[in-house]
Image: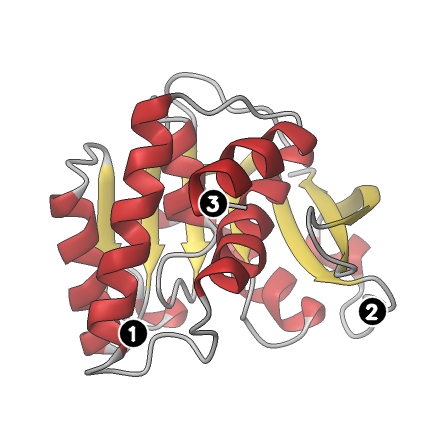
Amino acid sequence: MTLRRMLSDGSRDLGILLSEDQVDAFLVYLVELDKWNRKINLTAITNEQEIVVKHFLDSLSYLTGFKPMPALRLLDMGSGAGFPALPIKIVHPEISVTLVESVKKKASFLRHIIRTLNLTGAEVADVRMEELSEAYRSAYDIVTARAFADMGSAIRAGTPFLKPGGLMVLSRGAGETIGGPDLEKLGVLREKRLELTLPFSDHKRAIWVFKKER
């Protein structure tokens, strides 16, 4: 099966219909990821089909946890090579995304791919989460994280940046539990948990959604 077909069919399995231009954008992303990965460590996954499934489609699975709409603001913690924020941005260009990545070389890649794909309304903050300025606090509708420590740490780190009523959307292995923080003290409620299997694989994921009350 071609990569183009995997992208379109796999996205459809997740309830997302990609345009030809969006599929093209993912294929350019894939080429640039491979090119940069030879110079800096962006991902341990190098097989193209695995990148489509474990990075691109895995990122799009976050969209089962919230509904994008114009003017929505999303902050992604520890973006690495851009997952999940940039695949979400490709599919929903109407939203604004902030990618927080403290490793300067990875942040350089993120800026490069944003320019290459001509993504407007996307910014990169190359600092640690705790170094973000006050302007970022209580400013986002959605906070996402993928490779950001454990769920408890992600909730503690991300909650201050959510607006009241905002959602934190996390993707974890199907067997992982929350642990750690007292959600009530953080002003957070568990909204829902959805289990899914990524297309073209037996890779099971759980999408956790938490809502900030105040």
The crowd level at tag 2 (other Cα within 10 Å; few <14, some 14-19, many 20+) is few
Q: CA distance from mark 3 to mark 1?
A: 35 Å
Compared with 197, 38 (above or below) is below
Q: Which mark is residue 208?
A: none
Amino acid beneath label 2: Glu
The residue under label 2 is 176
Residue 76 seen in the current view = yes
Dot label at residue 102: 1
- Vertical placement of 97 versus 55: above or below? above
Q: Mark 2 or mark 1, which is nearer the start of the sequence?
A: 1
How many angstroms separate mark 2 from mark 3 (CA)?
33 Å
Label 1: how many Cα within 10 Å (few below 14, some 14–19, many 20+):
some
Q: How is the image coloured?
A: secondary structure
Spot the residue most to the front.
1
Relative height, residue 153 to residue 84 (above, below): below
Identify residue for label 3.
Answer: 2
Amino acid type indicated by mark 3: Thr
| Marks 2 & 3, CB-CB < 8 Å contact | no
- Residue visible at 40% across and 21% down in the picture: 19
Amino acid type of the residue that numbered disc 1 sits on in the rendered structure: Ser
State the image coordinates of residue 91 (x, y, percent, origin top left): 42, 30
Q: Residue 15 versus residue 71: which sits nearer the camera?
A: 15
In the image, 2: left or right of 165?
left
Among the two numbered marks 3 and 1 on one chain, the one whose residue lies closer to the N terminus? 3
Q: Residues within 10 Å of mark 3 (few under 14, many from 20)?
A: few
- 209 above or below 44? above
- Callout 2 secondary element: loop
Q: Quadrant of the C terminus?
A: top right
Give the CA distance from mark 1 to mark 2.
26 Å
Residue 134, can we see it? no
